[in-house]
Amino acid sequence: MDKNACFRNIPKVDVLLEDPDMIALCEEYGRDIAVDCIRSCTDDLRAFIGKSDDMAEIQRRTDSLVADIRRAAEALFTPDLRPVINGTGTVLHTNLGRAPISRAHSERMQALVSGYSNLEYDLEAGARGERYSHFEKLLCRITGAEAAMAVNNNAAAVFLVLSALGVGKEIPVSRGELVEIGGKFRVPDVMAQSGAVMVEVGTTNKTHPADYENVINENTGALLKVHTSNFRIVGFTESVDIKELCGIGAKHGLPVIEDIGSGVLIDLSKYGLPYEPTVQESLKAGASIVCFSGDKLLGGPQAGMIVGKKEYIARIKKHPMTRALRIDKFTAGALELTFEEYLSEERAIKNIPVLRMLTRTPYDIAESADKLATMLKGANADIAVEECESQVGGGSMPLARLASRAVTIKPRNISTAAFEERLRRLPLPIVGRVYDDRVALDLRTIDDELLGAVAEGVFRALE
């Protein structure tokens, strides 16, 4: 094998720049980009020749050099963050962006984010306004809160509330509620950074009202309750519910802060899902401040919602960290559109994608699975519709398993691993689950209007 001849067959940079395709590439992306891609691709080719003994593959890669250079240039200008089809059956998939915004909402948002808006301008008064005003009245009407605001996520919301109301003060919290919320961010860490002094009460499995009473003193700033939305302790357990804790707070003149986690505004148990306490119930029980996520069971954009009594919300809004943690115009607009849907429970279930997916019946999902399986007839694979279980995800309803249907695909011409990788590398990637040497696409998290794109992607990946 004459590798020196293979190296000599690689065109020089100036020669490649005279190629008509490369001239077009320079015009499209600029000469500097073209030169960088040429040098990168020729270096990769040299490295491959140096370690390979496959002359046929070396020749193939040499012949495709110009095409590889163009692909390299196009890749530089192709956004890395792009839409994905979620076939995992996990509705609030953290790695896939959690709650999707509805198409109708995104279309209304387009005009808002592509130009100017009255984000902090009161059009009626002709004066400076407040970015929370666009959704505050809506959220107060829905929840019964006196005031509301939002920051960029729920961890930030808890941090800000504790910073504004508890700095230098002792905050009792049950040991059974010292949760890790993901990414190794833990309640004790958030509290320490806020400047509040955490006082642990009770035990992991049992906390009684007297445990709070016994630690309250003149330096106690508030009582904190954290809803364990991402895990469950079962068996020999006992906890102090929010109503009882609010009674203790009222007795001692202390505000009660509850981190309710996923932000449920509708009792989803009537739709066959496990019961989760709602924001309205916490406020009705007497909570002074309730914090929750915007992009979990609420079904909106990433945000940390803070609702409660006006006197405390006013103090929080004035805290210096509020500006550092504030939401942008996209989030403010998306929250307003989301809360508009909640003015009617029927509208919310129908128009908020997360709620629509969670409340889909197995019969409805089976119809979608049958449609997709029919579209895949003739594919070079074994296709079947099978029963499966979906999950809520996002640290919400951890024990819930939802009956669903999946289309399973076992390719005949390539391995399942290679097929799954090809699906992920499609222009519109498809992410599914792999088990029993098959790729399963759970139809709970795939909208019917995407079935054609899924079928097209599957055929392409099987080529």
Image (cartoon, grey):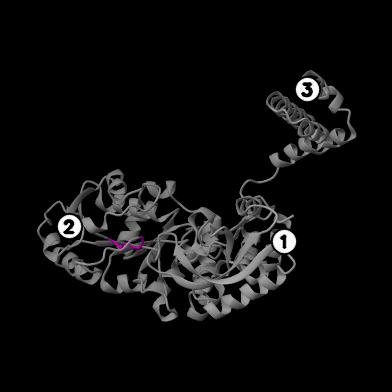
Q: Quadrant of residue 69?
A: top right
Left/right of residue 305 with respect to residue 188 in the rendered view: right
Q: Residue at x 74, y 54 (%)?
A: 463
Q: Are marks 3 and 1 in contact (CB under 8 Å)?
A: no
Residue 203's disc number: 2
Left/right of residue 435 with respect to residue 42 in the rendered view: left
Q: Label 1, label 2: how many angstroms apart (C-alpha)?
A: 57 Å
Residue bearing mark 1:
380
Looking at marks 2 and 3 on the same chain, the residue that comes earlier in the sequence is marked by 3
Name the image quarter holding the N terminus: top right
Left/right of residue 138 with respect to residue 310 in the rendered view: right
Looking at marks 3 and 1 on the same chain, the residue that comes earlier in the sequence is marked by 3
Residue 1's disc number: 3
Q: Amino acid at mark 1?
A: Asn
Q: Is residue 227 magenta?
A: yes
Q: Which range of residues does the magenta coloring cover?
A: 226-230
